[in-house]
């Protein structure tokens, strides 16, 4: 059990989510089922075995003629039937491919869940940093209001200046409380995702560290596109459908051999038991006739393969577009971080100068409030720009099916 009021690391959060996530557990069930089928492929050629027990009673209804077998009779039977056709090897191949597809689906689901948890984890860290910023703004507004009260009592400022300071203080308090409510809601949702009790005192260890990524989209597409799970799954689906089509053709059109063995015994009479064996070779005719139901089923399998090829082409085109878009967005987003950093430095310096001017009586409280709000907004924009850039790194790592830390190590460049 995860202790309340504790500190979560990103690794803790990801591991808890992977263990608790209900949709992932559903995929695990499918994976276990297909794995069981894949381990027992011999079942495709295992014969049908039946045992039977028979009880009966025989007597006259209208005739007075004595029946030889009148009275209670019973018997036992045993039957074995083995059907062989040319489609069995392809049915086995289809089961193997189905299990491989479930393995890919499971691994992809784990990867996507890890990225989702990572995004939410660092988003909460950014929101917590924003709360600290708003608390600082509130403290500044509180100190400013205290100074304004002192200056008002001494007659250095008017009532309007005091009122403006009070309004600024209330606005700062309201903004902080509104941000706290949003943070608590997002925290509750996050804790529900990773399956631990809701506790607003849960804290997070880590910080958003931004590294500039310089990656060529064409290089990434050439090196990593074929590794995407959705593309690999589509290729496997084409292969599986091809096996299904061959299996259907062989089962429908190829001759099939049926071997059967039956033994029956009546009233434990050793002279009354029977043993029969037969071999039957069936040669289908109707699947070769165009328009018949079995001929149409073969045609539909060919249509399914063609649709799967089109799905693969659509997926590849969409993936190329996504990777190119993310690479372009990363380049533009880095420029926005630089601009946000310069704006923050300018806003901080502007607030320092405005505060000095206010203390000297050369500017009003309203001007100081505007300068303080401008500094707070500049910090928020900078935090949001960093978070947006980091999320783009996560999205690109998901699009390439590589770990985001590997992406930073491979394509990261020293920050300016």
Image (cartoon, rainbow, N blue to C red):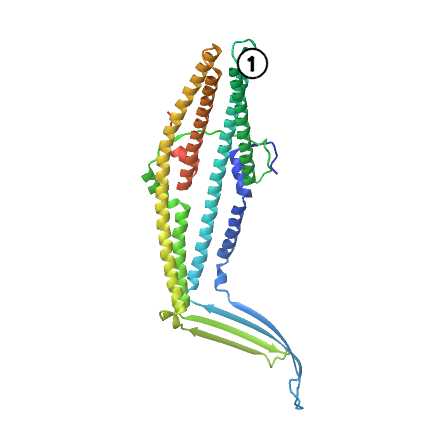
Q: Tell me the element at label 1.
A: helix
Q: Is residue 233 depicted above or below 256 in this figure?
A: above
Residue under the image location 36 percent in, 40 percent down:
323
* Dot 1 alpha-carbon crowd within 10 angstroms: few under 14, some 14 to 19, many 20 or more: many
Which residue is nearer to you in this view: 22 or 110? Answer: 22
Image location (x, y in percent) of residue 249: 39, 65
Q: Is residue 393 depicted above or below 58 in this figure?
A: above
**Figure quadrant of the N terminus:** top right
Res 219 quadrant in image: top left
**Figure quadrant of the C terminus:** top left
Which residue is nearer to you in this view: 77 or 146? Answer: 146
Judge whether residue 213 can be spotted in this image. Answer: no
Q: Is residue 338 depicted above or below 354 in this figure?
A: below
Image location (x, y in percent) of residue 226: 37, 46
Residue under the image location 45 percent in, 59 percent down:
92
Image location (x, y in percent) of residue 95: 46, 57
Is 414 left, or right, of 17 in this rendering?
left
Q: Residue furthest left?
A: 218
Q: Residue furthest front?
A: 159
Judge whether residue 41 can be spotted in this image. Answer: yes
Say which residue label 1 marks. 149
Residue under the image location 37 percent in, 57 percent down:
305
Res 187 quadrant in image: top right
């Amino acid at each position: 059990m995860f202790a309340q009021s504790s500190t979560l690391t990103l690794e803790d959060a990801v591991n808890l989510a992977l263990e608790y996530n209900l949709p992932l557990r559903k995929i695990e069930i499918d994976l276990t089922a297909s794995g069981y089928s894949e381990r027992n492929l011999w079942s495709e050629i295992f014969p049908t075995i039946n045992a039977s027990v028979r009880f009966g009673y025989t007597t006259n209804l209208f005739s007075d003629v004595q029946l030889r077998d009148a009275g209670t009779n019973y018997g036992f039977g045993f039957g074995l039937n083995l059907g062989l056709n040319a489609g069995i090897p392809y049915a086995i191949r289809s089961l193997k491919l189905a299990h491989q597809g479930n393995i890919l689906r499971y691994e992809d689901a784990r990867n996507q869940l890890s990225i989702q948890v990572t995004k939410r984890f660092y988003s909460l860290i950014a929101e917590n940093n924003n709360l600290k910023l708003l608390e600082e703004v509130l403290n500044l507004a509180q100190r400013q209001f205290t100074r304004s009260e002192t200056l008002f009592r001494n007659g250095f400022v008017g009532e309007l200046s005091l009122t403006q300071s009070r309004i600024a203080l209330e606005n700062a308090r309201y903004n902080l409380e509104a941000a706290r409510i949003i943070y608590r809601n997002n925290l509750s949702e996050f804790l529900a995702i990773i399956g631990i009790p809701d506790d607003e005192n849960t804290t997070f260890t880590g910080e958003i560290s931004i590294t500039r990524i310089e990656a060529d989209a064409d290089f990434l597409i050439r090196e990593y596109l074929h590794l995407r799970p959705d593309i690999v799954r589509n290729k496997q689906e084409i292969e599986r459908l091809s096996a299904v089509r061959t299996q259907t053709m062989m089962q429908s059109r190829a001759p099939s051999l049926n071997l059967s063995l039956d033994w029956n015994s009546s009233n434990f009479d050793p002279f009354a038991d029977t043993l029969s064996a037969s071999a039957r070779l069936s040669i289908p005719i109707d699947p070769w006739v165009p328009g018949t139901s079995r001929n149409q089923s073969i045609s539909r399998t060919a249509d399914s393969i063609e649709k799967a090829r089109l799905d693969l082409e659509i997926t590849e085109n969409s993936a190329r577009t996504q990777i190119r878009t993310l690479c372009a967005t990363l380049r533009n987003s880095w420029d926005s971080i630089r601009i946000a950093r310069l704006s923050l430095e300018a806003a901080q310096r502007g607030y320092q100068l405005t505060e000095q001017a206010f203390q000297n009586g050369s500017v009003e409280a309203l001007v100081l409030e505007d300068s303080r709000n401008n500094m707070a907004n500049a910090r928020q924009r900078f935090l949001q720009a960093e978070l947006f850039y980091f999320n783009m790194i996560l999205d690109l790592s998901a699009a390439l099916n590589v770990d985001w830390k590997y992406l930073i190590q491979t394509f990261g460049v020293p920050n300016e």
